[in-house]
Image (cartoon, rainbow, N blue to C red):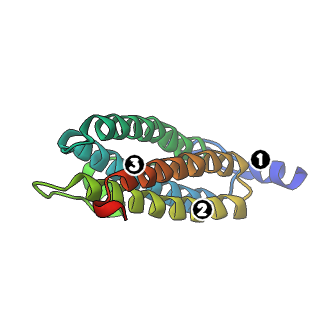
Amino acid sequence: MKSRLAKLEDHKAAPPLRTPTDLSPEAIEEVSHALNGLLADTFALFVKTKNFHWHVSGPFFRSYHLLLDDQSEGLQESIDILAERVRKIGGTTIRSIGQIASLQRIKDNDEDFVPAHDMLKELMEDNKGVAVAMREAHKVAEDHDDPATASLLEIWIDQTEKRTWFLFEAGRESTPSGH
Protein backbone atom coordinates (compact mmCIF):
# COMPACT_ATOMS: atom_id res chain seq x y z
CA MET A 1 0.00 0.00 0.00
CA LYS A 2 2.82 2.38 0.83
CA SER A 3 4.29 2.08 -2.68
CA ARG A 4 0.94 3.01 -4.25
CA LEU A 5 0.74 6.13 -2.10
CA ALA A 6 4.27 7.08 -3.06
CA LYS A 7 3.33 6.78 -6.72
CA LEU A 8 0.42 9.16 -6.14
CA GLU A 9 2.71 11.77 -4.63
CA ASP A 10 4.92 11.65 -7.71
CA HIS A 11 2.03 12.28 -10.13
CA LYS A 12 1.78 15.61 -11.87
CA ALA A 13 -1.45 17.57 -11.61
CA ALA A 14 -4.21 15.84 -13.48
CA PRO A 15 -5.20 17.41 -16.79
CA PRO A 16 -8.84 18.46 -17.15
CA LEU A 17 -11.17 15.42 -17.01
CA ARG A 18 -8.42 13.21 -15.55
CA THR A 19 -9.93 12.26 -12.19
CA PRO A 20 -7.16 11.54 -9.68
CA THR A 21 -6.85 7.83 -8.93
CA ASP A 22 -4.33 5.35 -7.66
CA LEU A 23 -4.84 3.17 -10.76
CA SER A 24 -1.95 3.15 -13.19
CA PRO A 25 -2.33 4.89 -16.57
CA GLU A 26 -2.35 1.42 -18.16
CA ALA A 27 -5.17 0.33 -15.84
CA ILE A 28 -7.18 3.45 -16.59
CA GLU A 29 -6.74 2.89 -20.32
CA GLU A 30 -7.59 -0.82 -20.32
CA VAL A 31 -10.51 -0.69 -17.88
CA SER A 32 -11.97 2.38 -19.60
CA HIS A 33 -11.67 0.68 -22.98
CA ALA A 34 -13.48 -2.42 -21.70
CA LEU A 35 -16.21 -0.36 -20.05
CA ASN A 36 -16.69 1.89 -23.07
CA GLY A 37 -17.23 -1.20 -25.23
CA LEU A 38 -19.85 -2.39 -22.75
CA LEU A 39 -21.40 1.06 -22.70
CA ALA A 40 -21.72 1.07 -26.50
CA ASP A 41 -23.22 -2.43 -26.39
CA THR A 42 -25.64 -1.37 -23.67
CA PHE A 43 -26.80 1.63 -25.72
CA ALA A 44 -27.23 -0.59 -28.79
CA LEU A 45 -29.07 -3.26 -26.81
CA PHE A 46 -31.27 -0.59 -25.20
CA VAL A 47 -32.26 0.83 -28.59
CA LYS A 48 -32.87 -2.63 -30.07
CA THR A 49 -34.96 -3.65 -27.06
CA LYS A 50 -37.03 -0.46 -27.35
CA ASN A 51 -37.39 -1.04 -31.11
CA PHE A 52 -38.76 -4.52 -30.48
CA HIS A 53 -40.93 -3.20 -27.61
CA TRP A 54 -42.51 -0.67 -29.96
CA HIS A 55 -42.94 -3.10 -32.84
CA VAL A 56 -43.85 -6.42 -31.22
CA SER A 57 -47.01 -7.99 -32.61
CA GLY A 58 -48.98 -11.17 -32.15
CA PRO A 59 -50.92 -13.22 -29.63
CA PHE A 60 -48.48 -12.56 -26.77
CA PHE A 61 -48.27 -8.82 -27.49
CA ARG A 62 -49.06 -7.57 -23.99
CA SER A 63 -46.67 -9.96 -22.23
CA TYR A 64 -43.81 -9.25 -24.64
CA HIS A 65 -44.47 -5.52 -24.72
CA LEU A 66 -44.23 -5.36 -20.91
CA LEU A 67 -41.22 -7.70 -20.76
CA LEU A 68 -39.27 -5.64 -23.29
CA ASP A 69 -40.21 -2.38 -21.59
CA ASP A 70 -38.96 -3.74 -18.27
CA GLN A 71 -35.72 -4.94 -19.85
CA SER A 72 -35.10 -1.65 -21.63
CA GLU A 73 -35.58 0.26 -18.35
CA GLY A 74 -32.94 -1.91 -16.68
CA LEU A 75 -30.53 -1.30 -19.54
CA GLN A 76 -31.16 2.44 -19.44
CA GLU A 77 -30.42 2.55 -15.70
CA SER A 78 -27.02 0.91 -16.19
CA ILE A 79 -25.88 3.35 -18.89
CA ASP A 80 -25.16 6.26 -16.54
CA ILE A 81 -23.55 3.99 -13.94
CA LEU A 82 -21.19 2.54 -16.58
CA ALA A 83 -20.21 5.96 -17.91
CA GLU A 84 -19.70 7.40 -14.43
CA ARG A 85 -17.50 4.43 -13.47
CA VAL A 86 -15.20 5.28 -16.38
CA ARG A 87 -14.99 8.88 -15.16
CA LYS A 88 -14.42 7.84 -11.53
CA ILE A 89 -11.27 5.94 -12.49
CA GLY A 90 -9.89 8.83 -14.54
CA GLY A 91 -10.97 7.80 -18.03
CA THR A 92 -13.21 9.45 -20.55
CA THR A 93 -16.24 7.89 -22.07
CA ILE A 94 -18.25 7.89 -25.28
CA ARG A 95 -19.35 11.22 -26.69
CA SER A 96 -21.56 10.48 -29.69
CA ILE A 97 -23.80 8.09 -31.58
CA GLY A 98 -20.96 7.71 -34.08
CA GLN A 99 -18.59 6.59 -31.35
CA ILE A 100 -21.20 4.14 -30.05
CA ALA A 101 -21.55 2.74 -33.58
CA SER A 102 -17.80 2.32 -33.88
CA LEU A 103 -17.54 0.43 -30.56
CA GLN A 104 -20.73 -1.63 -30.41
CA ARG A 105 -20.65 -5.37 -30.93
CA ILE A 106 -24.46 -5.69 -30.92
CA LYS A 107 -25.82 -5.71 -34.46
CA ASP A 108 -28.65 -3.30 -35.19
CA ASN A 109 -31.94 -4.64 -36.53
CA ASP A 110 -33.59 -2.27 -39.01
CA GLU A 111 -36.05 -4.76 -40.48
CA ASP A 112 -39.57 -3.51 -41.18
CA PHE A 113 -41.08 -6.54 -39.44
CA VAL A 114 -39.57 -9.12 -37.10
CA PRO A 115 -41.75 -11.96 -35.78
CA ALA A 116 -42.04 -11.84 -31.98
CA HIS A 117 -40.28 -15.19 -31.50
CA ASP A 118 -37.35 -13.98 -33.59
CA MET A 119 -37.17 -10.77 -31.54
CA LEU A 120 -36.89 -12.72 -28.31
CA LYS A 121 -34.30 -15.10 -29.72
CA GLU A 122 -32.18 -12.25 -31.12
CA LEU A 123 -32.29 -10.34 -27.84
CA MET A 124 -31.45 -13.51 -25.93
CA GLU A 125 -28.37 -14.07 -28.10
CA ASP A 126 -27.36 -10.40 -27.76
CA ASN A 127 -27.62 -10.60 -23.98
CA LYS A 128 -25.52 -13.77 -23.95
CA GLY A 129 -22.86 -11.90 -25.96
CA VAL A 130 -22.97 -8.99 -23.52
CA ALA A 131 -22.45 -11.40 -20.62
CA VAL A 132 -19.33 -12.75 -22.34
CA ALA A 133 -18.01 -9.20 -22.81
CA MET A 134 -18.79 -8.40 -19.17
CA ARG A 135 -16.81 -11.42 -18.00
CA GLU A 136 -13.87 -10.26 -20.14
CA ALA A 137 -14.13 -6.74 -18.68
CA HIS A 138 -14.32 -8.26 -15.19
CA LYS A 139 -11.01 -10.03 -15.83
CA VAL A 140 -9.45 -6.73 -16.97
CA ALA A 141 -10.68 -5.04 -13.78
CA GLU A 142 -9.35 -7.86 -11.61
CA ASP A 143 -6.00 -7.84 -13.43
CA HIS A 144 -5.67 -4.14 -12.54
CA ASP A 145 -6.79 -4.49 -8.91
CA ASP A 146 -10.03 -2.55 -9.51
CA PRO A 147 -12.52 -4.30 -7.20
CA ALA A 148 -15.17 -1.58 -7.51
CA THR A 149 -15.46 -2.11 -11.28
CA ALA A 150 -15.31 -5.88 -10.84
CA SER A 151 -18.09 -5.71 -8.25
CA LEU A 152 -20.35 -3.64 -10.53
CA LEU A 153 -19.72 -6.07 -13.36
CA GLU A 154 -20.72 -9.00 -11.15
CA ILE A 155 -24.10 -7.33 -10.54
CA TRP A 156 -24.55 -6.55 -14.26
CA ILE A 157 -23.63 -10.09 -15.26
CA ASP A 158 -26.40 -11.33 -12.99
CA GLN A 159 -28.86 -8.82 -14.48
CA THR A 160 -27.84 -9.83 -18.01
CA GLU A 161 -28.28 -13.50 -17.18
CA LYS A 162 -31.75 -12.71 -15.80
CA ARG A 163 -32.71 -10.93 -19.05
CA THR A 164 -31.41 -13.93 -21.01
CA TRP A 165 -33.40 -16.34 -18.85
CA PHE A 166 -36.64 -14.34 -19.19
CA LEU A 167 -36.22 -14.06 -22.97
CA PHE A 168 -35.53 -17.80 -23.21
CA GLU A 169 -38.60 -18.73 -21.17
CA ALA A 170 -40.88 -16.22 -22.91
CA GLY A 171 -39.68 -17.46 -26.30
CA ARG A 172 -40.51 -21.04 -25.41
CA GLU A 173 -44.23 -20.26 -25.22
CA SER A 174 -44.29 -18.87 -28.74
CA THR A 175 -42.07 -21.42 -30.45
CA PRO A 176 -43.87 -22.89 -33.45
CA SER A 177 -45.01 -26.47 -32.67
CA GLY A 178 -43.84 -26.05 -29.07
CA HIS A 179 -40.17 -26.76 -29.93
| Label 2, residues with CA under 10 Å away: few <14, some 14-19, many ≥20 | some
Q: Which mark is residue 9?
A: 1
User: Cα distance, mark 1 to mark 2?
Assistant: 33 Å
Question: Is 70 situated left or right of 149 in this image?
Answer: left
Name the amino acid, label 3: Ala
Q: Mark 1 or 3 closer to N-term?
A: 1
| Label 1, residues with CA under 10 Å away: few <14, some 14-19, many ≥20 | few
Front position among marks 1 and 3: 3
Q: Nearer the viewer, residue 149 or 161?
A: 161
Question: Is 47 situated left or right of 73 in this image?
Answer: left
Instruction: Provide the secondary structure element on which disc 1 rests.
Output: helix
Which residue is located at x 50 percent, y 44 percent? 82
Q: Nearer the viewer, residue 85 or 162?
A: 162
Which residue is located at x 31 percent, y 46 percent? 49
User: Cα distance, mark 1 to mark 3?
Assistant: 55 Å
| Label 3, residues with CA under 10 Å away: few <14, some 14-19, many ≥20 | some
Q: Mark 2 or 3 closer to N-term?
A: 2
Any part of residue 15 in sight: no
Q: Nearer the viewer, residue 135 or 10?
A: 135
Please give the residue where the numbered disc 2 appears in the rendered image: 135
Question: Is 90 situated left or right of 150 in this image?
Answer: left
